[in-house]
Image (cartoon, helix red, strand yellow):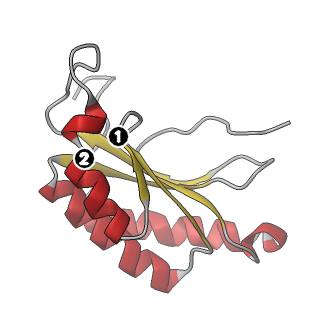
Amino acid sequence: MTDDDIPRWTLSEHLKAGEAALAEIQSDVERAASAQPICHHFDECEPTDILHVDRDEIYATVSDHFSTLGVDFAADRLEAWETSSPNFQWLNHRVPSLFEAANEAGLIYCGWTWEPKDRQPISASTVNVINNLSN
């Protein structure tokens, strides 16, 4: 694996990381009490050259399928967004369904981040999200 390679977690590893993230989210009582933006992160099994292909076109059916799962897929960024109050039931439903859908679509599910406004994200992801602070 090179420094640029994103590690691939098993579903079990995603769920374990998700449990740790949920514990941290619950410590932010004010924000955890309401639905917040959640970003699901993906990578390509076979990288495309975005200078020569249109990811929106390539992943049109993926976008439609992810929509039926309750998330909005942004093909250009390989992200899927939802607004939710994550809990253990959400974790054990959402993560396996997106993990499986990603595999079927030739994508790698990299995990999710809870991203309320004006604070650092809480991550259960192999992708390092540095900062989304809005001032």
**Above-or-below relation of 114 to 110:** below
Find residue 109 and report its horizontal and vertical position in percent.
30, 53
Numbered disc in front, either 1 or 2: 2
Query: Residue 31 vs residue 132: left or right?
Result: right
**Above-or-below relation of 36 to 113:** below
Residue that appears at 54% across and 67% down? 20
Which mark is drawn over residue 7? Answer: none
Q: Which residue appears farthest toward the top when viewing the image?
A: 51
What is the three-letter code of the residue carrying label 1?
Ala
Residue that appears at 62% across and 75% down? 85
Query: Residue 60 vs residue 119: left or right?
Result: left
Residue 46 falls in image quadrant: top left
Query: For mark 1, what is the residue?
Result: 75
Classify 10 Å Cα crowding around label 2: few (below 14), some (14-19), many (20 and above): some
Query: For mark 2, what is the residue?
Result: 60
Find residue 54 and report its horizontal and vertical position in percent.
26, 27
Residue that appears at 21% across and 53% down? 61
Question: Residues at badges 1 and 2 in contact (C-beta under 8 Å)?
Answer: yes
Q: Quadrant of the N terminus?
A: top left
Residue that appears at 28% across and 58% down? 64
Q: Earlier in the sequence, mark 1 or mark 2?
A: 2
Find residue 70 and report its horizontal and vertical position in percent.
42, 69
Find residue 48 and report its horizontal and vertical position in percent.
20, 25
Q: Secondary structure at mark 2?
A: helix
Q: Nearer the viewer, residue 58 or 104?
A: 58
Q: Quadrant of the C terminus?
A: top right
